[in-house]
Image (cartoon, rainbow, N blue to C red):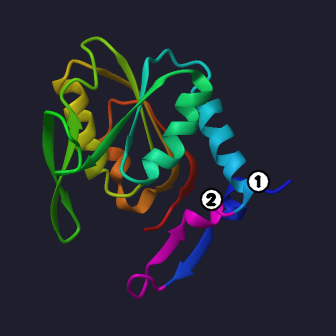
Amino acid sequence: MKKLEDYVRSIPDFPKPGIIFRDVTSILQDADGLHLAIDGLIESLKDVDYDVVVGPESRGFIFGVPVAYEAHKSFVPVRKQGKLPCETIAAKYFLEYGSAVIEMHKDAIKPGQKVVIIDDLIATGGTIEAIIGLIEQLGGQVVKICFVMELAGLKGKEKLSGYNVESLITYEGN
Protein backbone atom coordinates (compact mmCIF):
# COMPACT_ATOMS: atom_id res chain seq x y z
CA MET A 1 0.00 0.00 0.00
CA LYS A 2 1.17 3.49 -0.78
CA LYS A 3 2.03 6.01 1.92
CA LEU A 4 0.27 9.38 2.09
CA GLU A 5 3.33 11.22 0.81
CA ASP A 6 3.20 9.10 -2.36
CA TYR A 7 0.01 10.98 -3.29
CA VAL A 8 1.58 14.45 -3.00
CA ARG A 9 2.62 15.96 -6.31
CA SER A 10 5.83 18.00 -6.00
CA ILE A 11 6.26 20.81 -8.52
CA PRO A 12 9.77 22.27 -8.75
CA ASP A 13 10.36 26.01 -9.18
CA PHE A 14 6.78 27.05 -8.38
CA PRO A 15 5.81 29.77 -7.62
CA LYS A 16 9.43 30.87 -8.04
CA PRO A 17 12.81 29.26 -8.71
CA GLY A 18 14.17 27.18 -5.83
CA ILE A 19 10.75 26.41 -4.31
CA ILE A 20 9.23 22.94 -4.45
CA PHE A 21 5.45 23.33 -4.32
CA ARG A 22 3.71 20.48 -2.46
CA ASP A 23 0.31 20.03 -4.09
CA VAL A 24 -2.40 18.77 -1.73
CA THR A 25 -4.94 18.51 -4.54
CA SER A 26 -3.27 15.33 -5.77
CA ILE A 27 -4.20 13.72 -2.43
CA LEU A 28 -7.81 14.81 -2.91
CA GLN A 29 -7.96 13.52 -6.48
CA ASP A 30 -7.24 9.94 -5.46
CA ALA A 31 -9.76 8.07 -3.30
CA ASP A 32 -7.00 6.12 -1.53
CA GLY A 33 -4.98 9.27 -0.89
CA LEU A 34 -8.02 11.04 0.53
CA HIS A 35 -8.79 8.08 2.78
CA LEU A 36 -5.20 7.98 4.05
CA ALA A 37 -5.28 11.69 4.86
CA ILE A 38 -8.63 11.65 6.68
CA ASP A 39 -7.85 8.36 8.48
CA GLY A 40 -4.45 9.78 9.51
CA LEU A 41 -6.05 12.89 10.99
CA ILE A 42 -8.67 10.83 12.82
CA GLU A 43 -5.93 8.54 14.18
CA SER A 44 -3.93 11.54 15.41
CA LEU A 45 -6.96 12.56 17.52
CA LYS A 46 -7.87 9.15 18.94
CA ASP A 47 -6.72 9.99 22.48
CA VAL A 48 -7.67 13.68 22.44
CA ASP A 49 -10.65 15.00 24.38
CA TYR A 50 -12.26 17.74 22.30
CA ASP A 51 -15.63 19.32 21.60
CA VAL A 52 -15.27 21.10 18.27
CA VAL A 53 -13.16 21.13 15.11
CA VAL A 54 -12.10 24.46 13.61
CA GLY A 55 -10.87 24.73 10.03
CA PRO A 56 -9.72 27.70 7.99
CA GLU A 57 -11.00 28.44 4.52
CA SER A 58 -10.74 26.53 2.29
CA ARG A 59 -8.70 23.37 2.68
CA GLY A 60 -9.28 23.30 6.43
CA PHE A 61 -12.94 22.78 5.49
CA ILE A 62 -12.04 19.86 3.21
CA PHE A 63 -10.03 18.01 5.84
CA GLY A 64 -11.78 19.21 9.00
CA VAL A 65 -15.41 18.43 8.16
CA PRO A 66 -14.95 14.66 7.60
CA VAL A 67 -13.01 14.42 10.87
CA ALA A 68 -15.74 16.31 12.75
CA TYR A 69 -18.39 14.14 11.12
CA GLU A 70 -16.63 10.87 12.01
CA ALA A 71 -16.07 11.97 15.62
CA HIS A 72 -19.62 13.37 15.90
CA LYS A 73 -18.27 16.85 16.74
CA SER A 74 -19.31 20.26 15.48
CA PHE A 75 -17.31 22.14 12.87
CA VAL A 76 -16.55 25.87 12.93
CA PRO A 77 -15.36 27.60 9.75
CA VAL A 78 -12.83 30.42 9.81
CA ARG A 79 -13.29 32.61 6.76
CA LYS A 80 -11.82 35.56 4.97
CA GLN A 81 -13.12 38.94 6.08
CA GLY A 82 -16.68 39.74 4.99
CA LYS A 83 -17.81 36.17 4.23
CA LEU A 84 -19.69 35.30 7.43
CA PRO A 85 -23.28 36.59 7.87
CA CYS A 86 -23.53 37.07 11.64
CA GLU A 87 -21.56 39.05 14.21
CA THR A 88 -17.86 38.14 14.00
CA ILE A 89 -14.52 38.64 15.66
CA ALA A 90 -11.50 39.23 13.44
CA ALA A 91 -7.75 38.83 13.45
CA LYS A 92 -5.17 40.33 11.14
CA TYR A 93 -2.19 38.18 10.21
CA PHE A 94 0.82 38.58 8.03
CA LEU A 95 1.65 36.80 4.81
CA GLU A 96 4.91 36.69 2.91
CA TYR A 97 3.93 39.79 0.90
CA GLY A 98 1.33 41.60 2.99
CA SER A 99 -1.47 40.92 5.41
CA ALA A 100 -4.97 39.49 5.53
CA VAL A 101 -7.90 39.33 7.94
CA ILE A 102 -9.82 36.24 9.02
CA GLU A 103 -13.09 36.05 10.92
CA MET A 104 -15.08 33.65 13.03
CA HIS A 105 -18.65 33.98 14.27
CA LYS A 106 -18.67 35.51 17.73
CA ASP A 107 -20.88 32.69 19.05
CA ALA A 108 -18.97 29.83 17.36
CA ILE A 109 -16.92 28.77 20.38
CA LYS A 110 -18.35 28.61 23.88
CA PRO A 111 -16.16 29.37 26.91
CA GLY A 112 -14.40 26.22 28.08
CA GLN A 113 -14.80 24.27 24.85
CA LYS A 114 -11.85 22.13 23.84
CA VAL A 115 -10.89 22.85 20.25
CA VAL A 116 -8.94 21.01 17.56
CA ILE A 117 -7.71 23.00 14.55
CA ILE A 118 -7.27 21.11 11.26
CA ASP A 119 -5.67 22.46 8.09
CA ASP A 120 -3.89 21.10 5.05
CA LEU A 121 -0.51 22.77 5.48
CA ILE A 122 1.63 24.66 7.95
CA ALA A 123 4.16 26.99 6.39
CA THR A 124 4.97 30.16 8.38
CA GLY A 125 2.21 29.52 10.95
CA GLY A 126 0.68 33.01 10.76
CA THR A 127 -2.84 31.90 9.86
CA ILE A 128 -3.04 29.32 12.64
CA GLU A 129 -1.54 31.75 15.15
CA ALA A 130 -4.35 34.18 14.30
CA ILE A 131 -6.97 31.42 14.61
CA ILE A 132 -5.63 30.44 18.03
CA GLY A 133 -6.06 34.07 19.10
CA LEU A 134 -9.70 34.08 17.99
CA ILE A 135 -10.47 30.80 19.76
CA GLU A 136 -8.85 31.95 22.99
CA GLN A 137 -10.58 35.35 22.77
CA LEU A 138 -13.90 33.45 22.82
CA GLY A 139 -12.79 31.37 25.82
CA GLY A 140 -11.95 28.17 23.95
CA GLN A 141 -8.94 25.98 24.69
CA VAL A 142 -6.86 24.70 21.76
CA VAL A 143 -6.01 21.08 22.64
CA LYS A 144 -4.43 20.00 19.33
CA ILE A 145 -3.52 21.34 15.91
CA CYS A 146 -3.32 18.88 13.01
CA PHE A 147 -1.95 19.35 9.51
CA VAL A 148 -1.71 17.06 6.54
CA MET A 149 1.67 18.58 5.59
CA GLU A 150 4.36 20.69 7.23
CA LEU A 151 7.06 22.72 5.50
CA ALA A 152 9.57 22.57 8.36
CA GLY A 153 12.04 24.92 6.70
CA LEU A 154 9.62 27.83 7.16
CA LYS A 155 9.59 27.27 10.95
CA GLY A 156 5.84 27.76 11.38
CA LYS A 157 5.71 25.14 14.10
CA GLU A 158 7.97 27.35 16.23
CA LYS A 159 5.20 30.02 16.31
CA LEU A 160 2.92 27.38 17.78
CA SER A 161 5.22 26.26 20.60
CA GLY A 162 3.21 25.46 23.68
CA TYR A 163 0.51 23.76 21.59
CA ASN A 164 0.18 20.11 20.65
CA VAL A 165 0.98 20.15 16.91
CA GLU A 166 1.10 17.14 14.61
CA SER A 167 1.61 16.80 10.86
CA LEU A 168 1.03 13.63 8.87
CA ILE A 169 3.89 14.50 6.48
CA THR A 170 6.91 16.71 7.17
CA TYR A 171 9.05 18.18 4.40
CA GLU A 172 12.36 19.61 5.63
CA GLY A 173 12.59 22.40 3.04
CA ASN A 174 10.41 25.33 2.11
Q: Which residues are magenta?
A: 13-29
Secondary structure of residue under mark 2: helix
Most distant residue in the top direction: 112
**Where residue 32 is drawn, which disc sits there?**
1
Q: For residue 72, which quarter of the picture?
A: top right
Q: For residue 136, which quarter of the picture?
A: top left
Tell me whether the residue at label 2 lies in contact with that at label 1, contact meaning CB atoms closer than 8 angstroms. no
Secondary structure of residue under mark 1: helix
**Where residue 28 is drawn, which disc sits there?**
2
Task: Work out whether residue 137 or residue 159 is closer to the camera in this orientation and state it.
Answer: 137
Is 128 in the magenta? no
Given the image, on which type of amino acid does mark 1 rest? Asp
Going 28% across and 50% down the picture, which residue do you hit? 127
Give residue 126's position: percent from left, percent from top. 25, 51
Classify mark 1: residues with Cα within 10 Å, few (<14), some (14-19) or many (20+): some
Is 19 in the magenta? yes
**Where residue 67 is drawn, which disc sits there?**
none
**Residues under labels 2 and 1: Cα distance?**
9 Å
Q: Is residue 102 left or right of residue 24?
A: left
Q: Is residue 10 above or below residue 136?
A: below
Give residue 120's position: percent from left, percent from top. 48, 52
Task: Work out whether residue 134 or residue 110 is closer to the camera in this orientation and state it.
Answer: 110
Q: Is residue 140 above or below residue 65?
A: above
Going 53% across and 30% down the picture, which residue do you hit? 68
Given the image, on which type of amino acid does mark 2 rest? Leu
Going 27% across and 16% down the picture, which residue do you hit? 110
